[in-house]
Amino acid sequence: MEPMNLDRVEWEDEAGRRHVYEWVNDVPLNGKEDTIQVNFLRCFVMKADKCGKEKIVYRNSWVTDVDVTSDNIKILVRAGRCRWKSENELFNVIKQKLKRKQTMSRS
């Protein structure tokens, strides 16, 4: 498989963190010949430490059927982060309920 040429947008927020968004459209979901084509995007957020060395403080990636462009990349990343946050919070609630149930059944 050939390396992907990713489109890229970078910007700095008001807190001084550097955001790097990269994407490529119409790529195979996996290495199989009969797989579906998807659009891939990823996000890195970097912040300088006390010594000035940049460290990645957040990273994530997603696939979508929406064509990714420089005009919509920020909103797609924001939507992906919100969805991840809500799913993660839901899983944590379910996990806590299961732990309580297991604790109660052992009593």
Image (spheres, rainbow, N blue to C red):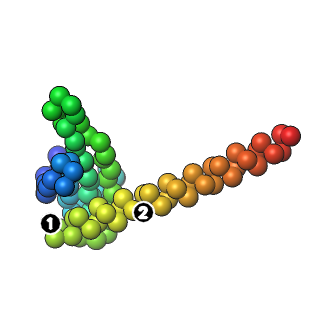
Q: Is residue 98 left or right of residue 62?
A: right
Q: Residues within 10 Å of mark 1 (few under 14, many from 20)?
A: few
Give the percent coordinates (x, y) of residue 11: 14, 55
Viewport quadrant of the C terminus: top right
Disc assigned to residue 89: none
Q: Residue at x 65, y 49 (%)?
A: 96
Mark 1 element type: loop
> Callout 1, which amino acid?
Ser
- Residue on which the image places disc 2: 83
> Callout 2, which amino acid?
Arg
Taking the image as drawn, is residue 97 in sight?
yes
- The answer to whether mark 2 and mark 1 are in CB contact below 8 A is no
Residue 53, image quadrant:
top left
Question: Mark 2 to mark 1: distance in Å?
Answer: 21 Å
- Which of these two is toward me, 75 or 65? 75
Mark 2 element type: helix
Q: Is residue 90 left or right of residue 80?
A: right
Looking at the image, is mark 2 or mark 1 earlier in the sequence?
A: 1
Q: Is residue 47 left or right of residue 59?
A: left
Q: Is residue 63 left or right of residue 90?
A: left
Q: Residue at x 76, y 49 (%)?
A: 101
Q: Residue at x 19, y 38 (%)?
A: 48
Taking the image as drawn, is residue 1 in sight?
no
- Residue on which the image places disc 1: 70
Give the percent coordinates (x, y) of residue 1: 22, 46
Q: Residues within 10 Å of mark 2 (few under 14, many from 20)?
A: few
